[in-house]
Image (cartoon, helix red, strand yellow):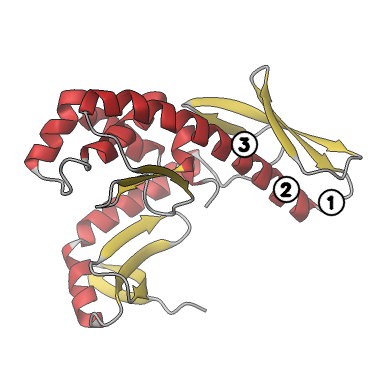
Amino acid sequence: MVKLNHIQYGNREIFFKIERSDRRKTVGIYVSPKAGVVVRAPRFLEAERIKELIRKRAQWIITKQEFINTHSQLHPEKEFVSGESFFYLGRQYRLKVLKTASKQAESCKLMSGRFFIGIHGDLSSAETREAVKEALMGWYIGRAKEKIPERVELYARQIGKWPERIEIKDQKSRWGSCSRHGVVRFNWKIIMAPVTVLDYVIVHELCHLIHQSHSARFWQKVQTIITDYTMRRKRLREYSLMLSAFD
């Protein structure tokens, strides 16, 4: 069982868990519907220093938790059963699970405004749920590997910078990243968001090929490509819970 740490902030307690790594140089604080508050920190950073950082970000953490609590009621945890809706490029499509006699790998198709997934009829409920989830993930990842490089090419031409490599990853807390060596990585789940939000994430990471930090010059560069980036960034936050179905 994971030990939870906590601090007192006014009349509230904030519980959090610490994940340490020898490779990590900085501290990151993340709030998610399933994992709660997670602090990723360097191996030897003192616990009191981490608590101090939590206190400094306490109001932000509470605001994030309240947002999650409110929106979780609107977007309950997925069961991966017929009738549920899943997003693709900002539109919702209903799921239809078909029981089959075939023992071949489960397949997922988007046809006539629906996701159709064929599942072997002998699987238990838990096995069926996992098989449906895996089939959907495979479909999304395939679409992400097709769509994202197309959009990267479009915006790289406008920015005048091309990445060394594009990687589609399964990331828990990031939509994208850009390494100092020019490798850009994208979370496959972003393919569920509208194209306008997807484009914001892509432009954000491509602009890091020019400016590594989130400096004023970085945001100015983003704005030259996407004038309404602040609105799109807000929409990305709003979609964050909807995109967490596969966590």
- Outermost residue on the front side: it is 164
Q: Amino acid at mark 2?
A: Ala
Find residue 98 and report its horizontal and vertical position in percent. 81, 34
Circle 1 residue: 123
Disc 1, disc 2: CB below 8 Å? yes
- Of circles 3 and 1, which is in front? 3
Crowding at dot 2, Cα within 10 Å, few <14 / some 14-19 / many 20+, comes out as many
Q: CA distance from mark 1 to mark 2?
A: 9 Å
Residue 3 in which image quadrant:
bottom left
Q: Does the rendering let one see residue 228?
A: no
Q: Which mark is residue 139?
A: 3
Q: Which residue is at the front of the view, 227 or 32?
A: 227
Please say if 59 is above or below 90: below
Circle 2 residue: 131
Q: Secondary structure at mark 2?
A: helix
Please say if 201 is above or below 167: above
> In the displayed structure, does residue 175 sit left or right of residue 219?
right
